[in-house]
Image: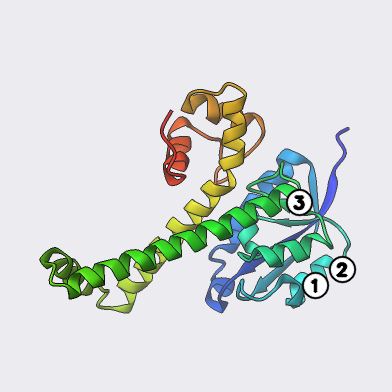
Amino acid sequence: MKSTVPVVAYYRVSTKAQGESGLGLEAQKAYIETAAKSHGWEVVAEYVETVSGTIAPLDRPECAKALAHGLPLAVAKLDRLSRDVEHIASLMKRVSLKVATMPQADNFQLHLFAALAEQERAFISQRTKEALKALKDRADGGCETSLWKIANRAKAKPQDSNTAALLLARAVRTERAKEFAVTLEGTIALARSKGCSTLRDIALFLNERKVLTPQGKEWTAMQVSRVMKRLNDSPV
């Protein structure tokens, strides 16, 4: 009989509305349930928290209760704990982490993934600021194309809250997809080092290691292609 590993599940939503509606919560539970079945985790307790990710995990009441069990802490994705690598590093000193989207990763690997994700977010933010400043400078210098682009950006601003919410949700999904792609960079590199030369080979490599897509499903060549494009990688 296969032995099981007892874990405590921790779910975090960012707003009260999300907590009450279950938006995001059901998906997190689905991730952990799928990983638990595949990797022999036994969820012995669950804690749900409605709090901003900017608050350190150790300062959150429900997270503190989860840690008090002294068991591995299971989360759907690493960002449900925090997007701050210092928060993650501090937490790792106290508990073993189990991440449903990266079930094979140990604390050391998760620390690396968190650091890479934080660095990539910083790079994206800096590149965006630099690009906007360069555009403004060209516009101030009389560049008609730049003036036209700035005018179009102003026109494209949402005219109502519903449009704004949709655009924000789309931006969040895009950012999360990019962050998830970064977490797979090392695994894809390992697949290539072992002779996986096609998208299909890499998909099979991920599936053999029980690495699931963000939707909790097995990989296809098309999904691998999308991840690699987000990593600015060349298609194989």
Q: Is residue 144 visible?
A: yes
Give the alpha-carbon distance from disc 3 to disc 1, as whole Å. Answer: 19 Å
Q: Quadrant of residue 19?
A: bottom right
Nearer to us of marks 3 and 2 is 3
Residue density around tag 3, few if under 14, some if 14–19, many if 20 or more, within 10 Å: some
Is there a contact, CB below 8 Å, between mark 3 and mark 1? no
Is there a contact, CB below 8 Å, between mark 1 and mark 2? yes
- Whichever of callouts 3 and 2 sits on the residue coming sooner in the sequence is 2
In the rendered structure, the answer to whether residue 53 lies left or right of residue 106 reads left
Q: Position of residue 25 (x, y in %)?
A: 60, 63
Q: Quadrant of residue 144?
A: bottom left
Type of the residue with mark 2: Ala
Return the mark for residue 64.
Answer: 1
- Whichever of callouts 3 and 1 sits on the residue coming sooner in the sequence is 1
Residue at 33% from the left image edge and 78% from the top image edge? 161
Type of the residue with mark 3: Asn
Return the mark for residue 107.
Answer: 3
In the rendered structure, the answer to whether residue 111 lies left or right of residue 231 reads right
Instruction: Judge whether 198 appears above or below 65 on screen.
Output: above
Type of the residue with mark 1: Ala
Residue at 61% from the left image edge and 40% from the top image edge? 186
Q: Position of residue 187 (x, y in %)?
A: 61, 37
Residue at 71% from the left image edge and 62% from the top image edge? 88
Circle 1 SS class: helix
Snapshot colouring: rainbow
Q: Quadrant of residue 236?
A: top left
Quadrant of the image containing the N terminus: top right
Residue density around tag 1, few if under 14, some if 14–19, many if 20 or more, within 10 Å: few
Residue density around tag 2, few if under 14, some if 14–19, many if 20 or more, within 10 Å: few
Q: Position of residue 128 (x, y in %)?
A: 38, 64
Q: Mark 2 sits on what residue?
A: 68
